[in-house]
Image: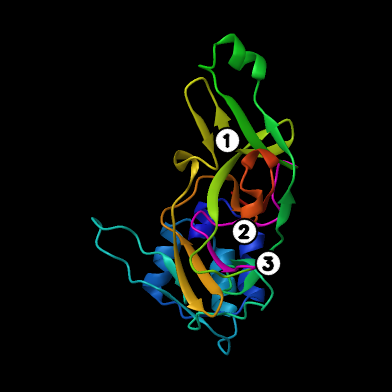
Amino acid sequence: MKLVKAGVGEDTIVSMVNTQPGKYSLGTDDIIALKRSGVSEKVITAMLNKPTSQTPTVHISPEPPADQDRPSVQQAQPQSPDPGVPDEAGLYAVTLGGGVDRIEGRVTSFVRSGSRLASAATLGIHANRVNVQIPGSRARVTMSPRPAFYYRPVQDEGGLDLILTRMTIKSGRRQFEVGAQGAWRESRGVSVRHQLDFDAKQVGPHLYKIVLTHELDAGQYAFYLLRGREHASVYEGSGFVYCFQVE
């Protein structure tokens, strides 16, 4: 139901039903609920024809009264807190099937300042902003509006050292602000108003699970890690980013 609502094509959904682990047990009420939600007969037929020897199981809630929300398809969550996360440090996205997909991090060694001329012309009222820029307008990994991740830090000193922020696109590049200088103030690091909240829990030695506290809008995002105490100056542009997108 979520895939149909998101505009995913019929053939893609059928392919997912046929290739991903899952067991479907559809009764009359389930089929009615799917049809009312816009799921095509081709998709429903694929679910009915799916072999029943695979796991996990997918259940559909019975049809609720008219004054309640319609039921949604719920996929069984992995029982293990560590669904095969590799030992290598890094960020791993949780896929629809419950597995993990590594997000390759990349070093940021270039920053671009805002217009110094505009800042000077307005006597510093218009701040001179500093942005980290990433080549390309799209990330490789696409996530759902409420994604989940596993993270293994390079050096686990206790606590999580990541900041999540949304990126803007300009001239075919993705960027986010890491500092600003004005007449009466100077800020360094990603502003709190540009940071996105998430829940993080340690689920194993040097392993954290990250879950978003709210759904993300479509766009480009990055987990940002400032690398090392010796690179504390954001104007050196020394950091590390893990990029993903939401559609």
Amino acid under label 3? Arg
Mark 1 vs mark 3, foreground winner is: 1
User: Which is more N-terminal, label 2 or label 3?
Assistant: 2
* Label 1 CA crowd tier, 10 Å (few <14, some 14–19, many 20+): many
Q: Earlier in the sequence, mark 1 or mark 2?
A: 2
Residue at 53 percent of width and 23 percent of height? 182
In the structure shown, which secondary structural element does the residue marked by tag 2 occupy? helix
Q: Position of residue 54 (x, y in %)?
A: 58, 86
**Near-viewer residue (143 or 73):** 143
Q: Nearer the viewer, residue 226 or 216?
A: 226
Identify the element where label 3 is drawn.
strand
The mark closer to the camera, 3 or 2, is 3
Q: CA distance from mark 1 to mark 2?
A: 45 Å
Q: Position of residue 18 (x, y in %)?
A: 65, 74
C-alpha gap between disc 1 and disc 3: 29 Å
Task: Kindly indicate whether the residue at mark 2 contacts the one at mark 1 (C-beta within 8 angstroms).
Answer: no
Q: Give the magenta-colored segment's residue range.
A: 136-154
The residue that mark 3 highlights is 102
Disc 3 from disc 2: Cα separation: 27 Å
Classify residue 151 as left or right of residue 67: right
Residue shown at 45%/42% (left/top)? 192
> Quarter of the image holding residue 124?
top right
Residue shown at the point (66%, 49%) measured from the top left: 231
On whether residue 220 falls in the magenta region, the answer is no
Which numbered mark, 1 or 2, is in the foreground of this view? Answer: 1
Q: Residue 115: where, in percent of width, then height? A: 66, 20
The dominant secondary structure in magenta is loop
The residue wearing badge 2 is 10
Does residue 243 appear in this view? no
- Along the line of sight, which residue is nearer the eye, 104 or 215? 104
Circle on res. 23? none
